[in-house]
Amino acid sequence: MLHKRRIAVAGILFALPSIFGIILFVILPMLTSLLLSFTDYRIVNTPKFIGFTNYKRLFDGTDPYFYNSLWVTFKYVILRVPLGLIVSFIAAFLLNMEFIRGKSVFRTIFYLPAIVPAVASSMIWIWLFSPDLGLFNSFLEALNLPTLNWLYSENTVVPSIVIMSLWGMGSTIIIFLAGLQGVPRSLYEAAIVDGAGAVRKFRHITIPMMTPIIFFNLIMGSIGAFQVFTEALIMTQGGPNNASLFYNYYIYRQAFQFGEMGQASAIAWILFIIILIVTAIFFRTSKSWVFYESEV
Amino acid sequence: MRKSRRVSQIIVYAILILGSVFCLLPLFWLVRSSMMSSMQIFEMPPKWIPSPFRFQNYTEALTTIDFLRFFRNTLTITASCLIGALISSSLGAYSYARLDWPGKKFFFGLLLASMMLPGAVTLIPTFIGWRLADLINTYVPLILPVWFGSAFDIFLLRQFYAGIPRDLDEAAYVDGAGPWTIFWRIIIPLSKPPLIVIGLFSFMNSWNDFMGPLVYLNEESKFTLALGLQMFQSLHSAQWHLLMAAPTVVILPVIIVFFIGQRYFIEGITLTGMKG
């Protein structure tokens, strides 16, 4: 076409802000942070190259919080991601059933908590979790069950934060719901003709057709879960006894409370590599369980 | 058969209602606690409805620290980010969706990949950069990056732009229109709904942002509502009636915006879930 060149020039011009943005706020900082991770850099002095010392200090346990925060974060991710997927999938599936009336009302209610600012929701949940005065413990008391210390016990702090995070699952539910609505009706109709019951329809149509969306939510959910932060800062300050010192909070503390920029960069890069590995594993295994329509 | 179907329908409704209770109860509890007296809130077993309703809690919470100022600050940041997000993401998305240029695939790939990058990796050098530029404790670090377009917004809008028939562009080219004319006269007028979506998400992001202000702002007079809330929380650790009044006020605008733009929210999230 005549103006191919003109279009290309326009294209670059239109994309220029975003190209600059990527270079300035993604690529450049990424490389800088990689470099910094090999330096001794407290915010006040100039960076000094120290090779792998930062990494060594982390892995050999000189910094006692590294393995602790890794473990705590893994615990959170392993609880939160599958539970989040299952709960939101079930919610979306039930919501999508034909006979349900008031779908949009339910949908609004399920989404509502997701818009609450994290600081505010953290404050709400501290109150709900309060051991002496909280709503949850008074429920347990009314049912004659033993009360829990929720955020104040090493054993229950992570599960408590997981419960709280399930409260804000609205967008995952809506993504699932949209996916379910996109499953062609003809597939179900054909299955009914073949005499399939509800369970078989669910297993052999709903689940396979939804695998790409499950996969999407799995990836995004995991990446998000690895970066849990505000809840810990507001509700527990990483406690009790560092049992909720999540990885991102650990980075924040190291960088912005202790000013250890070099060390913190190394910690951040380890998180990045962990996330890369986890997503790579998901992508690898996805070939065997994610089903794309176009492959039929 | 009939009867068992009825039973299973009731079970499904029961589960959905239980879920709704789980979603609404914390919010109800927030509002309920925010209007109680400091005595009543400690009563055991807890009362469901405050009596009397103490609306003074709000004025008390709002006057102990300068919430009005935090509100203005947040509004300034939110509005500046909103305008930036709309301009830069619509420009970028148009280019990635409908114009061909060398390197487009590469940069779009980078853009998508950047969504998976943990923020902590870029936060530290970005902070150091802003510090070198002597812009800590200003709103520039919170606003300027948004003007370069966020990957999420561009992706979302591109999904929409890619769905507008290409024939429109072709016809306009034949008539001698350039890319800018097409963008301004055809694409933008057609994309009101997704732009509203971007606007809403952008509003929510800046209104609710905590990490950014926490890292970049250190003078109380510059604080945002989220930071103000955190400060309020550390100041009033046992005064639960006030601790619940303050977030109620902060959440209220978000809830109002959500109910006004509800339809667009749902559409927007749906668009993100689609494969690009």
Image: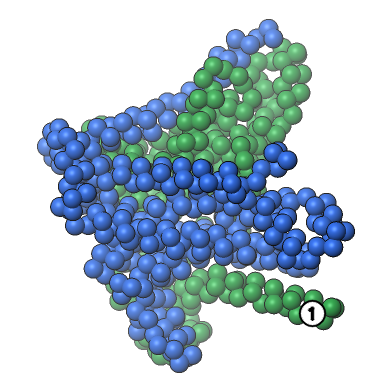
Chain colours: A blue, B green
Which residue is pictured at 17% across the width and 47% down the height?
Answer: A57
**Closest to the observer, B200 or A107:** A107
**Closest to the observer, B19 or A234:** B19
Q: Position of residue A275 (x, y in %)?
A: 40, 46
- Report which residue position mark 1 lands on: B4
Q: Position of residue B10 (x, y in %)?
A: 73, 78
**Closest to the observer, B7 or B63:** B7
Quadrant where the image shows the C terminus of chain B: top right
Residue B118, above or below A245: above
Q: Position of residue B223 (x, y in %)?
A: 32, 52
Badge 1 crowding class, 10 Å Cα cut-off, few under 14, some 14 to 19, many 20 or more, is: few
Which residue is pictured at 32% across the width and 52% down the height?
Answer: A248
**Closest to the observer, A275 or A98:** A275
Q: Indicate the secondary structure of the residue bearing disc 1.
A: helix
Count of residue discs: 1
In the displayed image of the protein, which residue is found farthest to the top? Answer: A2
Residue A146 located left or right of residue A143: left
